[in-house]
């Protein structure tokens, strides 16, 4: 099980990303628009830099829904490899069977 502080930190990041998503998108579009004057684009970049770092989507870490483990994560199932194997062995994941040959 991952530390509770790591899990909580990631949740705070998710909330910040949702809170600043629209503002960040508008500033990025303004900064990338070559039709706008250079001063306006530069001002948008400065405003983007003043936003909290954790409001960036790339700061979010994928974590297992059950244990909070960050490594060996399967996006489709939102589980880490350990929990995936355990649940598959118990028959809790439809269509997944332990292989044998």
Image (cartoon, helix red, strand yellow):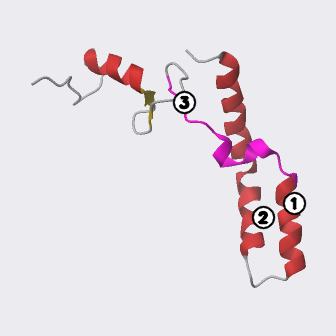
In percent of width and height, residue 20 lies at 75, 50
- Looking at the rendered structure, the number of numbered marks drawn on it comes to 3
Question: Which dot marks residue 26?
Answer: none
Rendered-image quadrant of the C terminus: top left
Please state which of the two labelled residues, at mark 2 or mark 3, is closer to the viewer. Answer: 3
In percent of width and height, residue 24 lies at 75, 57
Q: Which residue is mark 2?
A: 27
In the displayed structure, does residue 87 sit left or right of residue 45? left
Residue 60: in magenta span: yes
Q: Which residue is mark 3?
A: 63
In percent of width and height, residue 39 lies at 90, 77
- The residue furthest front is 101
Alpha-carbon span between mark 2 and mark 3: 29 Å
Alpha-carbon span between mark 2 and mark 1: 7 Å
Q: Which residue is mark 1?
A: 47
| SS under mark 1 | helix
Alpha-carbon span between mark 1 and mark 3: 30 Å
Q: Residue at x 40, y 26 (%)?
A: 81
In the displayed structure, does residue 59 sit left or right of residue 100? right
Range of magenta residues: 50-65
Decide which of tag 1 and tag 3 comes sooner along the chain: 1
- The residue furthest left is 101
| SS under mark 2 | helix
| SS under mark 3 | loop
Q: Residue at x 55, y 23 (%)?
A: 68
């Amino acid at each position: 099980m991952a530390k509770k502080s790591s899990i909580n930190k990631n949740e705070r990041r998710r909330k910040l990303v949702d809170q600043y998503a629209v503002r960040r998108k508008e500033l990025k579009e303004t900064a990338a628009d070559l039709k706008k004057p250079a001063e306006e684009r530069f001002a948008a970049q400065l405003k983007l830099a003043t936003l909290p770092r954790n409001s960036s989507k790339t700061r979010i870490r994928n974590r297992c829904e059950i244990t909070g483990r960050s490594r060996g994560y399967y996006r489709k199932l939102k589980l880490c490899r350990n929990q995936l194997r355990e649940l598959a062995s118990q028959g809790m994941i439809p269509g997944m069977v332990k292989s044998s040959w």
